[in-house]
Amino acid sequence: MISSTHLSRRGFTKTTLFAGAALASRAISADTPPPRIRTGLIGCGSVSNQYLPQLTNSPFVEVVSLCDIKPERAQRQAEKFKVAHHYPHIDAMLAGEPFDFLIDTTDMQEHEKINRRALESGKHVWSEKPIANTLAAGQELLRMAQAKKLRLWGAPITVQSPQFVFMAKTLAAGKLGRVAAAHADYGHEGPNWSAFFYEKSGGSMPDLAVYNLTSLTGLLGPVKNVSAMLSIVTAEREIRDRGTIKVTEEDNAQILLDHGGGVLSHVQSGFNYFNPNGHDGSKESRHTISIVGSGGFMGLVGYDWQPLGVDLATKESPNLERHVVDAQGYVWQQGASLAAECLATGKELLVTPEQALHVLEIITAARESSATGQRVALTSTFKWPVVS
Ligand SMILES: NC(=O)c1ccc[n+]([C@@H]2O[C@H](COP(=O)([O-])OP(=O)(O)OC[C@H]3O[C@@H](n4cnc5c(N)ncnc54)[C@H](O)[C@@H]3O)[C@@H](O)[C@H]2O)c1
């Protein structure tokens, strides 16, 4: 036990932050490096190749186990990233090498059940999007986490980019005048490695629109009402290892959002978009998000998950000028590593589970609106502004 009277200011701050963190039981001195969070990752497919280099290079993470229902994938990643333990099922993983933090990179439809199992077992959770399949199930998971003093977060992390912060501060400073409208879009020709993207509770919205919905709700505030039209453009797809599958969830989405106060925005996503740059975010140079008001225009250069700058024109300075061309260390793959840093040091993120669940409600409301032809009122909200 360390008495606060014997601590330097730095040591006291650090200890106080630790007290706020869920893993705070370990007392530290000013010179002790923060603990590495014992971490397990479940779902060793495509995106694990993006997460694991970040995690294994993070000073706040010790990856102790991997899991995949296709055991050869867990074994391959364990060998490649030098992880000591790998398992073919979540039950075996939870009963095996102890860990504190689970990263869920499985199929979109699996997250809810896996996240619940992890929280029930006392693990903090970082989940790929979505955290759950419905708002009610997601809120129940969040309540469970809070009751157990555990943390739950969900991708994506677009609000962490310096370009997002610049846009949020520009809006807060009133530089666009009375804000009226925004548009955002993201699409490509669709993944060909897994069927879940095209099956019930999949689709382009939870996979792609989710980035724009996180950015626009982060910039313009929580949404009051949603209207949407969804369609299936390509009825059958060729999927590696599966052959021809039927597409049963939308692959083409147009979503209208009412943020209140007269502010309207529009998000467009799909799996049928010609894109000369494929998935390579660094080559996209057009505005994928634009916001306009009575006194100015702002365009995000490139995708919001890997932005390259922000173009701004105002009445005072009407020629479009580019700002924030430096990523300042931000990469979209770092969400789970940032969450581990939060667990280790108490440093908070701009990403919140409440916003992720609000975005999930927009997606399920868009499905309902398209099916019924009605505008759908939302019930959830989150703390806004995101950047103060
Ligand atoms: N691939 C990308 O570039 C990318 C980028 C950002 C986000 N994401 C998100 O990451 C998630 C995974 O996508 P992906 O492209 O890696 O898919 P994937 O199909 O390549 O990988 C998913 C893996 O999860 C495993 N899995 C499924 N159910 C499981 C279970 N119950 N227990 C253990 N393992 C299970 C599968 O066997 C597979 O290996 C999705 O939510 C997707 O939206 C993917």
Image: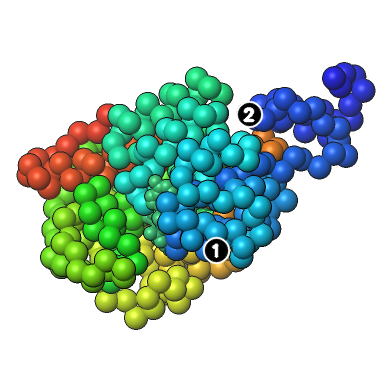
Q: Nearer the viewer, residue 103 or 156?
A: 103
Q: Name the quadrant where ligand 1 sits.
A: bottom left
Q: Nearer the viewer, residue 256 or 348?
A: 348
Q: Is residue 244 visible?
A: yes
Residue drawn at x 86%, y 35% is: 30
Q: Examine the rendered structure and indicate whether residue 154 appears above or below residue 19.
A: below
Q: Secondary structure at mark 1?
A: helix
Q: Is residue 12 left or right of residue 50?
A: right
What residue type is disc 2 on? Answer: Ala
In this view, the mark in front (1 or 2): 1
Residue bearing the label numbered 1: 76
What residue type is disc 1 on? Answer: Arg
What x and y, as percent, mark residue 168?
47, 49
Q: Is residue 208 left or right of residue 43?
A: left
> Where on the picture, by quarter, is residue 112?
top left
Residues marked 1 and 2 touching at CB (< 8 Å)? no
Q: Residues within 10 Å of mark 1 (few under 14, many from 20)?
A: some
What x and y, as percent, mark residue 106?
41, 51
Q: Is residue 347 left or right of residue 176?
A: right
Pick whichever of labels 1 and 2 is earlier in the sequence.
2
Q: Which mark is residue 22?
A: 2
